[in-house]
Image (cartoon, rainbow, N blue to C red):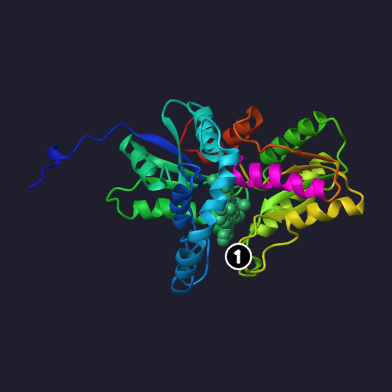
Amino acid sequence: MTRPSDHPPVPPSKVGVLLTNLGTPDAPDAPSVRRYLGEFLSDRRVVEIPPLVWQPILRGIILRTRPKKSAHAYAQVWGEDGSPLAAITKAQAGALAGAFGPDVVVDHAMRYGKPAIGDRLAALKAQGCDRILLAPLYPQYCGATTATANDAAFAEMAGMRWQPAIRTLPPYHDDPAYIDALAQSVREGVAALDFEPDAILASFHGMPERTLQLGDPYHCQCRKTARLLGEGLGRELTVTFQSRFGRAKWLEPATDTVLGELPASGVRKIAIIAPGFSADCLETLEELAIRGRETFVEAGGTDFAYLPCLNDSDPGVAMLKKILARELAGWVAAA
Ligand SMILES: C=CC1=C(C)c2cc3[nH]c(cc4nc(cc5[nH]c(cc1n2)c(C)c5CCC(=O)O)C(CCC(=O)O)=C4C)c(C)c3C=C
Ligand SMILES: [Fe+2]
Ligand SMILES: [Fe+2]
C-alpha cells in the first residue's frame, strides 16, 4: 500500500519554455536523410494522402531516390556545428537561457529527429517544470508545422499521469515585434549591399493549394507578413512560395519560376528574404541562396543577395524574448 509519505519528493516548481522547429537529418548522407524523410513524410499533417495510397509511393519511390539528392544538397550547407537548422535553434535556446529569470528553463526540440519533442518535454517535467510554454518557431501558423509540433507534445502528455499545465505560442506573423525586427534586418542588409535592388522578394515555404481551400490560415498569414513588412520598409515586396513537392498544385507564384522570369521584365538586381523561417536551413541556404541565385543569373539577372533569417541575431533574440515573455505572463513575475 502506498502511504502519502512514500510519494517521491516533488521538485521545486519551475516553468519550461520549449522552442521547437522542424528537424533535420543527423548527417548529410543518404541513410540519415532517408531516416529523417521517412519520419517527416509519414506525418499525416504533412502529406494528407491516405496511408494505404501514400506509404507504397513513399517507401517504393521517394525514399529510394530523394535521399541521395537531398544529402548532396545538405552537404553544401552543412557547417562545423552540423545542420544549420539544428545549430541555430540550439543557439536561439542558448541565447534565451536566463532571459526570463532563474525559475524558467529554456530548451529546444525538433518535430522530426533529435532532440525529440517528447523527450525534451519529459526532461523539462523531470526538472520540476509544472508549467510549460510550447513555442513552435513558425511565424505563420500551418497545420503541417505548428499543429504537428504541438501534437507531438500532447502525444507525450497522453502517457503522463501528472501532466504539466501547457500554453502554446500563437502565430506571430503580424506581431509588431516580429515585423519591426524583420524590417530592421532587411534595412541593414540592403544598406550593406554594393547594389540597390530593383525588387525585394519574400519567399515563403509552399503548401498544397488545397490546404488553403480547407481553411489553413498559412497563406493569408504569409501575405499579411509581407504586406506589413512592405509597409514598414516603405516599398512593396514580391511574394513567392518555394520548395514545391509532388504533383499537386501548390501555392503560387513559385519562387523558382519568378526568379527565372524577373530579368526579362527588367528586374536584374534583387534581394531575397525568407520571412517564414525563424532559422536558416536547407530551404534558404541551398534552395534560395545557391540554386535561386543560379536560376536568376542564368536568366540574365546581374545582382543577387540572399539576406539571412533573424536566427540568433540580437534583434532576433530580442523579438523572441518579447513574444515569449507575453505568453509567460502570470506564470513568471518579471515576464
Ligand atoms: C509535402 C511535403 C512538404 C510540406 C507540406 C512542407 C511544408 C513545410 N515545410 C516547412 C519548413 C521546412 N521544410 C524543410 C525541408 C523539407 N520540406 C519538405 C517537404 C514539405 N514541406 C522536404 C521533403 C524537405 C527536406 C529536404 C528535401 O528533401 O527537399 C525545412 C528544412 C529542414 C532542414 O533540415 O534544414 C524546413 C525548415 C514549412 C514552414 C512548411 C509549411 C508551411
Ligand atoms: Fe518543408
Ligand atoms: Fe527544398
What amino acid type should be assigned to the residue bearing mark 1? Gly
Residue ranking furthest to the left: 1
User: Is 295 included in the stretch rendered in magenta?
Assistant: yes
Percent x, y of residue 10: 25, 35
**Residue lying at 53% horizontally and 38% vertically, measured from the top left:** 83
Percent x, y of residue 168: 50, 48
Horizontal side of residue 176 vs 231, given as left or right: left
Ligand 1 is within 8 Å of the C-beta of the residue at disc 1: yes
The answer to whether residue 41 is above or below residue 273 is: below
Q: Is 5 in front, or is 112?
A: 112
Total tally of numbered discs in the picture: 1
The answer to whether residue 42 is above or below residue 335 is: below
The answer to whether residue 113 is above or below residue 332 is: below
**Residue lying at 92% horizontally and 50% vertically, measured from the top left:** 266
**Residue lying at 46% horizontally and 61% vertically, measured from the top left:** 42
Q: Residues within 10 Å of mark 1 (few under 14, many from 20)?
A: few
Q: Secondary structure at mark 1?
A: loop
Write down the quadrant of residue 260 in the picture: bottom right
User: Is 206 included in the stretch rendered in magenta?
Assistant: no
Query: Is most of the magenta stretch helix, strand or loop?
Result: helix
Disc 1: which residue: 246
Does residue 152 appear anywhere in the picture? yes
Percent x, y of residue 111: 46, 49
Percent x, y of residue 64: 48, 60
The answer to whether residue 208 is above or below residue 291 is: below
Q: Is 100 in front, or is 206?
A: 206
Write down the quadrant of residue 179 in the picture: top right
First to last magenta residue range: 280-298
Does residue 225 appear anywhere in the picture? no
Horizontal side of residue 186 vs 25, given as left or right: right
